Every structure is written in C-alpha cells, then in structure tokens.
Amino acid sequence: MKNRLKVLRAERDWSQADLADRLEVSRQTVNALETGKYDPSLPLAFKIARLFGQPIETIFQDEA
Amino acid sequence: MTLASKFPKNRAVRALVFAAVGAPVGYLVGKYLAGLEDAGVWSAPDLGWSDALAIVLALLLLGAGVITMIVSANRKALGRQIDPEGGRPATSAQASFYAQNGGVLALAGLMMATPVVVRAVFDPVPPLIASAAMIGLVALFLVQTASSISVWIGSDELMRRATAEISALTFVILQGALFLWAAGEKLGLLPVLTLWDAVSVMMTAYLIIAGVVIWRRGLA
C-alpha cells in the first residue's frame, strides 16, 4: 500500500520523531509506514487521517 | 569532535568495522586459551554441541541486554539510538521501556546459561545444588515472563505485530521440524535428541527468525 505520510509530514516540517509523538507510536513505526514496510491498523490509519485532517483514502492508496 | 561523531553512521559499515576488529581479537583470545589448555593451566569444560550453542546464545542475549540497559541509562545516548537524525534526549518512559527490554534479554541469557554452567562447575551436580539452581531458574522465569508481558503492554502496534510474526513463524517452522525429527528418531533413522538439544535449537531458530522479521519491518 502506498501512502503520502512523508509528504504530509514534510509539509508541516515535522521530523519522524515529531509525528511518532503525535501518533503515540515509535519513530521506527513511522519510518516503517513511510517506507511501505508496514501497513497500519485501522485505528492507527484513522488517527493519522484525523491528525492530518484528510480522509484515509487520500493518505493511503491501494496499489492493486 | 567526539569519538561517536567520527564513527561510521552506516550500519553495514559499522558491522564490517566490528567484524574486522572482532575476528582477529577472537582468534587471538582463542589461541591464547588453547595455549593455556595445552600448558595444563586451564581445561575447557567438555560441552556437548547443544551446551556450546546455549552458551553462545546466552552470551549474545546477556551482551545485548547489558548494552541496552547501559545505553538506556543515558538519555542522550538513547535518544541518538532512537532518533539518529533528531538526536533529542529520550523521555523517561522511553528510557524505562528500553531498560526493561534490556532486562528481559539479559534474564533470558542468564536462564540459558545457568543449567550449563552449573553442570560444568559441579559434575555430577549434588541434589541440593540442582534444587537451588532450579528454584533460582523458576524465579528468574517468573520475573522474565512478567517483564515480557510488561514490554508487550508498553509496545506500539508494529512491535506487537513483529513479536506475533516471530512467534508464529517460529512455531510453524519448528513444529514441522520437530515432527520430522521425532518421526525419523522413532524409525531409528536419526539420532536421539534431548529436550535441552531441542531448546537450544528452538532458541537459535527464534533469534534468527527475530532478526529476519526485525530487518524486514525496518526495526533494525
């Protein structure tokens, strides 16, 4: 699954650690999400969507 | 400029530097110990393959655990490990989480080493010493289990996912291997294994699988 996390984070000038703090996950988790090594659970995806104020489908796109 | 800033940042380069330094040091220490044994100053305990494997695993776990605990005692150093780019000091919650992680690893190493060391020191092991060691092991096991549960509770979803994947993969691979070995043993085709042999193999497989999953998930 592709996502725009890195772009959205960069637009706000946040580091991975800043985003991790806001999402209450580890920096490694943010890194794994951004590099596509891990797809978030639904609760975390909703949390990300709320944080950036955008619908989930504009942040995460199915590659199929 | 500090020593840390001079050190290569790339993990692969760092691993190669450690290997380049560690290999000759290990060779020289081994050669020195072999020389002492030849001179009759010292004799290496007669360990079976699973005992030797258990000691290697125990040293790895103990080493990793102690290093993690030492790093977590220094919030700045821990902060650099958690976030190499940001480099801000770790929070007290992070320090406590990593210290607990280190403790879990160190306790696992201690538990792995204890039966082998007790057998190597007291051979044959007197019943009183065996009972004392076993009581100590049960106590360590309870503390380690409680700490592992606490680490699980404090982990985020990726860490929990990785732990679940490692456990599932280890079970699937080892239950198949255990069945095939047991069948071969029953048919008289394969040598008989002890439970200690099986535990040493299981822990080795667990650590290898953990390494692969952690690398694949970008947690390394």
Image: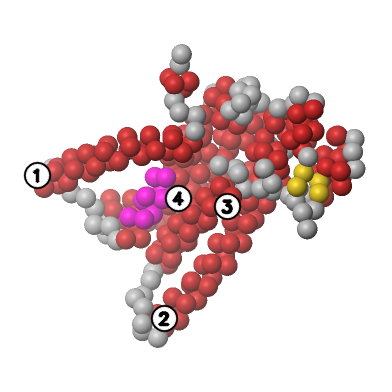
Circle 2 or circle 4, nearest the eye: 2
What residue does disc 2 label? Answer: B184
* Distance Cα–Cα, label 2 vs label 1: 43 Å
Q: Nearer the viewer, residue B31 or B139?
A: B31
- Which three-letter amino acid code belongs to the residue tagged 2? Gly
Residue A20: mark in rendering? none
- Which three-letter amino acid code belongs to the residue tagged 3? Val
Q: Is residue B41 above or below residue B192?
A: above
* Distance Cα–Cα, label 3 vs label 2: 30 Å
The secondary structure making up most of the magenta span is helix
Q: Residues within 10 Å of mark 4 (few under 14, many from 20)?
A: many
- Which three-letter amino acid code belongs to the residue tagged 1? Ala
Res. B126 visible in picture: no
Count of numbered circles on the image? 4
Residue B14 colored in magenta in the image: no
Where's residue A41, x and y in %? 78, 50
Same chain letter for marks 3 and 2: yes
* Distance Cα–Cα, label 4 vs label 3: 24 Å
Where's residue B49, x and y in %? 32, 61
Label 4 sits on a secondary structure element that is: helix
> In the rendered view, does B12 fall on the left or right side of B100?
left
Q: Chain of mark 2?
A: B
What residue does disc 3 label? Answer: B213
